[in-house]
Image (cartoon, rainbow, N blue to C red):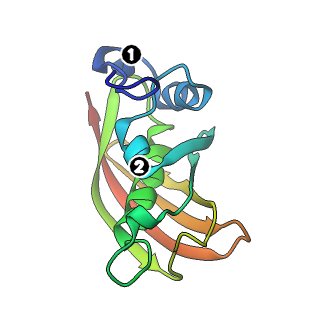
Amino acid sequence: MSEAGYGVVPLEQARAMDGLSLFKGLLEGRFPAPPISKVLGFRVSEVELGRVVFDYTPVFDHFNPLGTVHGGIAATLLDSVMGCCIHTTLKAGIGYTTVEIKVNYVRAMTDKTGPVKAEGKVINVGSRIGTSEGKLYDSAGKLLAHGTTTCLIFPI
Protein backbone atom coordinates (compact mmCIF):
# COMPACT_ATOMS: atom_id res chain seq x y z
CA MET A 1 0.00 0.00 0.00
CA SER A 2 1.57 3.28 -1.07
CA GLU A 3 -0.44 5.53 1.27
CA ALA A 4 -2.50 4.73 4.36
CA GLY A 5 -5.96 3.54 3.41
CA TYR A 6 -5.24 3.12 -0.32
CA GLY A 7 -3.93 0.12 -2.20
CA VAL A 8 -4.93 -2.99 -4.03
CA VAL A 9 -6.34 -6.17 -2.52
CA PRO A 10 -3.80 -8.91 -3.38
CA LEU A 11 -5.03 -11.00 -6.34
CA GLU A 12 -4.79 -14.25 -4.37
CA GLN A 13 -7.04 -12.81 -1.67
CA ALA A 14 -9.50 -11.25 -4.14
CA ARG A 15 -9.62 -14.48 -6.16
CA ALA A 16 -10.59 -16.43 -3.02
CA MET A 17 -13.73 -14.42 -2.20
CA ASP A 18 -17.01 -13.67 -3.93
CA GLY A 19 -17.62 -10.16 -5.24
CA LEU A 20 -20.19 -9.19 -2.64
CA SER A 21 -17.76 -10.05 0.19
CA LEU A 22 -15.01 -8.04 -1.50
CA PHE A 23 -17.18 -4.93 -1.85
CA LYS A 24 -18.57 -5.21 1.68
CA GLY A 25 -14.95 -5.37 2.85
CA LEU A 26 -14.17 -2.18 0.91
CA LEU A 27 -17.24 -0.46 2.35
CA GLU A 28 -16.37 -1.50 5.92
CA GLY A 29 -12.70 -0.51 5.55
CA ARG A 30 -11.36 -4.06 5.92
CA PHE A 31 -9.69 -3.68 2.50
CA PRO A 32 -7.86 -0.65 1.15
CA ALA A 33 -9.68 1.74 -1.16
CA PRO A 34 -8.31 1.55 -4.71
CA PRO A 35 -5.89 4.35 -5.65
CA ILE A 36 -8.30 5.76 -8.27
CA SER A 37 -10.73 6.65 -5.48
CA LYS A 38 -8.06 8.90 -3.96
CA VAL A 39 -7.16 10.54 -7.28
CA LEU A 40 -10.78 11.28 -8.19
CA GLY A 41 -12.14 11.70 -4.67
CA PHE A 42 -14.92 9.12 -4.63
CA ARG A 43 -15.79 6.36 -2.17
CA VAL A 44 -18.05 3.34 -1.88
CA SER A 45 -21.06 4.29 0.25
CA GLU A 46 -23.57 1.45 -0.30
CA VAL A 47 -23.24 -2.17 -1.35
CA GLU A 48 -25.79 -4.94 -1.83
CA LEU A 49 -26.14 -7.83 -4.23
CA GLY A 50 -26.42 -6.32 -7.72
CA ARG A 51 -26.20 -2.69 -6.54
CA VAL A 52 -23.34 -0.32 -5.65
CA VAL A 53 -23.32 3.41 -4.81
CA PHE A 54 -20.32 5.77 -4.85
CA ASP A 55 -20.21 9.28 -3.37
CA TYR A 56 -18.26 12.06 -5.07
CA THR A 57 -18.04 15.81 -4.60
CA PRO A 58 -17.13 17.77 -7.75
CA VAL A 59 -14.01 19.92 -7.41
CA PHE A 60 -12.37 22.70 -9.40
CA ASP A 61 -9.35 20.47 -10.15
CA HIS A 62 -11.62 18.33 -12.37
CA PHE A 63 -12.79 21.24 -14.56
CA ASN A 64 -12.44 21.27 -18.33
CA PRO A 65 -11.62 24.49 -20.27
CA LEU A 66 -15.33 25.43 -20.34
CA GLY A 67 -15.57 25.68 -16.54
CA THR A 68 -17.44 22.47 -15.74
CA VAL A 69 -16.34 19.10 -14.43
CA HIS A 70 -14.91 17.08 -17.32
CA GLY A 71 -17.38 14.51 -18.66
CA GLY A 72 -14.74 11.83 -18.18
CA ILE A 73 -15.28 12.10 -14.43
CA ALA A 74 -18.99 11.22 -14.81
CA ALA A 75 -18.08 8.47 -17.28
CA THR A 76 -15.50 7.03 -14.87
CA LEU A 77 -17.94 7.10 -11.96
CA LEU A 78 -20.59 5.37 -14.07
CA ASP A 79 -18.15 2.83 -15.53
CA SER A 80 -16.99 2.02 -12.00
CA VAL A 81 -20.40 1.56 -10.37
CA MET A 82 -21.81 -0.33 -13.37
CA GLY A 83 -18.89 -2.78 -13.31
CA CYS A 84 -18.79 -3.06 -9.53
CA CYS A 85 -22.50 -3.91 -9.25
CA ILE A 86 -21.89 -6.80 -11.66
CA HIS A 87 -18.87 -7.82 -9.58
CA THR A 88 -21.08 -8.15 -6.47
CA THR A 89 -22.89 -11.05 -8.19
CA LEU A 90 -19.77 -13.03 -9.12
CA LYS A 91 -18.51 -16.13 -7.32
CA ALA A 92 -14.98 -16.53 -6.01
CA GLY A 93 -12.44 -16.96 -8.79
CA ILE A 94 -14.52 -15.05 -11.35
CA GLY A 95 -13.61 -11.62 -12.71
CA TYR A 96 -14.89 -9.18 -15.30
CA THR A 97 -13.84 -6.37 -17.58
CA THR A 98 -15.77 -3.65 -19.36
CA VAL A 99 -16.41 -4.39 -23.03
CA GLU A 100 -18.34 -1.20 -23.75
CA ILE A 101 -20.11 1.68 -22.03
CA LYS A 102 -22.67 4.19 -23.19
CA VAL A 103 -23.02 7.47 -21.28
CA ASN A 104 -25.64 10.19 -21.67
CA TYR A 105 -24.94 13.57 -20.08
CA VAL A 106 -27.99 15.45 -18.80
CA ARG A 107 -26.60 18.27 -16.62
CA ALA A 108 -23.11 19.66 -16.06
CA MET A 109 -21.33 19.43 -12.73
CA THR A 110 -19.31 22.26 -11.18
CA ASP A 111 -17.71 22.80 -7.80
CA LYS A 112 -21.05 24.37 -6.78
CA THR A 113 -23.04 21.18 -7.52
CA GLY A 114 -22.27 19.69 -4.12
CA PRO A 115 -22.12 15.99 -3.30
CA VAL A 116 -23.36 13.53 -5.93
CA LYS A 117 -24.19 9.83 -5.95
CA ALA A 118 -23.42 7.33 -8.69
CA GLU A 119 -25.61 4.23 -8.50
CA GLY A 120 -25.08 1.04 -10.47
CA LYS A 121 -27.74 -1.69 -10.80
CA VAL A 122 -27.47 -5.04 -12.53
CA ILE A 123 -29.71 -5.64 -15.54
CA ASN A 124 -28.58 -9.22 -16.22
CA VAL A 125 -25.59 -11.40 -15.39
CA GLY A 126 -24.99 -14.60 -17.32
CA SER A 127 -22.05 -16.98 -17.43
CA ARG A 128 -20.05 -14.87 -19.94
CA ILE A 129 -21.75 -11.46 -20.22
CA GLY A 130 -23.13 -9.04 -17.63
CA THR A 131 -25.09 -5.85 -18.28
CA SER A 132 -25.95 -3.04 -15.91
CA GLU A 133 -27.15 0.54 -15.77
CA GLY A 134 -25.85 3.52 -13.87
CA LYS A 135 -27.26 6.87 -12.83
CA LEU A 136 -25.50 9.92 -11.44
CA TYR A 137 -27.61 12.23 -9.24
CA ASP A 138 -27.02 15.49 -7.40
CA SER A 139 -28.05 15.88 -3.75
CA ALA A 140 -31.52 17.12 -4.78
CA GLY A 141 -32.08 13.93 -6.80
CA LYS A 142 -31.66 15.60 -10.21
CA LEU A 143 -30.22 13.32 -12.86
CA LEU A 144 -26.78 14.45 -14.10
CA ALA A 145 -25.86 11.50 -16.34
CA HIS A 146 -26.86 7.89 -16.99
CA GLY A 147 -25.43 4.95 -18.85
CA THR A 148 -25.24 1.25 -19.54
CA THR A 149 -22.40 -1.24 -19.76
CA THR A 150 -21.61 -4.67 -21.07
CA CYS A 151 -18.95 -6.64 -19.20
CA LEU A 152 -17.13 -9.84 -20.14
CA ILE A 153 -17.10 -12.41 -17.31
CA PHE A 154 -14.22 -14.88 -17.01
CA PRO A 155 -12.22 -17.03 -14.55
CA ILE A 156 -9.27 -15.26 -12.86
Residue count near mark 2 (Cα–Cα under 10 Å), binned few <14, some 14–19, many ≥20: many
On screen, residue 129 above or below 105: above
In the image, 80: left or right of 107?
left
Q: In which quarter of the image is the C terminus?
A: top left
Percent x, y for residue 27? Answer: 58, 32
Percent x, y for residue 56? Answer: 55, 55
Q: Residue at x 46, y 79 (%)?
A: 105
Q: Is mark 2 on a helix, strand or loop?
A: helix
- Of callouts 1 and 2, the N-terminal one: 1
In the image, 69: left or right of 44?
left
Q: Which residue is drawn at 47% across and 26% down?
A: 5
Residue count near mark 1 (Cα–Cα under 10 Å), binned few <14, some 14–19, many ≥20: some
Q: Which amino acid does label 2 sit on?
A: Gly
Q: What residue type is labelled 1?
A: Ala
Give me the disc on residue 16.
Answer: 1
101 or 60, nearer to the observer: 60
Percent x, y for residue 42? Answer: 50, 48
Q: Residue at x 32, y 34 (%)?
A: 95
27 or 41, nearer to the observer: 41
Residue that badge 2 annotates: 83
